[in-house]
Image (cartoon, grey):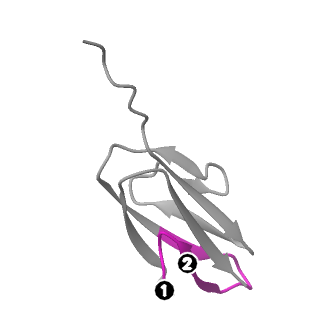
């Protein structure tokens, strides 16, 4: 028998506008690192922080709404968009 080739899922955050996105576990800190690998079925909480003079406009991708926090369940490679204006 051979082991199955199982990839580790990742969470990738894209940003538009001026602001930062951080995960509660500190694996993701956008500006600097906007992608991290997670265990399957991990729950990740993201927080959007607008830069001075900007406002948080909302999430896209695996997150939605305009709350500055979002929790996402990692079941596969996951994309999140944070929009600042």
Task: Reply yes or no: does residue 76 show up in magenta.
Answer: no
Identify the residue at image location x=48%, y=69%.
62
Q: Which residue is disc 2 drawn over? A: 59
Percent coordinates x, y for residue 50 in the rendering: 63, 78
- Give neighbour class at mark 1: few <14, some 14-19, many 20+ (Cα, 10 Å): few
Which residues are the magenta region?
Answer: 47-64
**Residue lying at the far front of the rendered structure:** 1
Image label count? 2
Of the two numbered discs 2 and 1 on the same chain, state the one appearing first in sequence.
Answer: 2
| Quarter of the image that includes the C terminus | bottom right
Percent coordinates x, y for residue 16 in the rendering: 72, 72
Element type at mark 2: strand
Image mark for residue 45: none
Element type at mark 1: loop
Circles 2, 1 touching at the beta carbon (< 8 Å): yes
Image mark for residue 65: 1
């Amino acid at each position: 028998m051979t082991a199955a080739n199982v990839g580790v899922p990742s969470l990738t955050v894209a940003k538009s506008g001026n602001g930062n996105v951080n995960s509660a576990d500190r694996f993701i800190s956008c500006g600097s690192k906007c992608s991290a690998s997670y265990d399957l079925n991990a729950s990740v909480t993201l927080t959007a922080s607008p830069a001075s003079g900007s406002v948080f406009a909302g999430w896209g991708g695996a997150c939605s709404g305009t709350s500055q926090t979002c929790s996402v369940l990692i079941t596969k490679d996951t994309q999140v968009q944070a929009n600042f204006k």
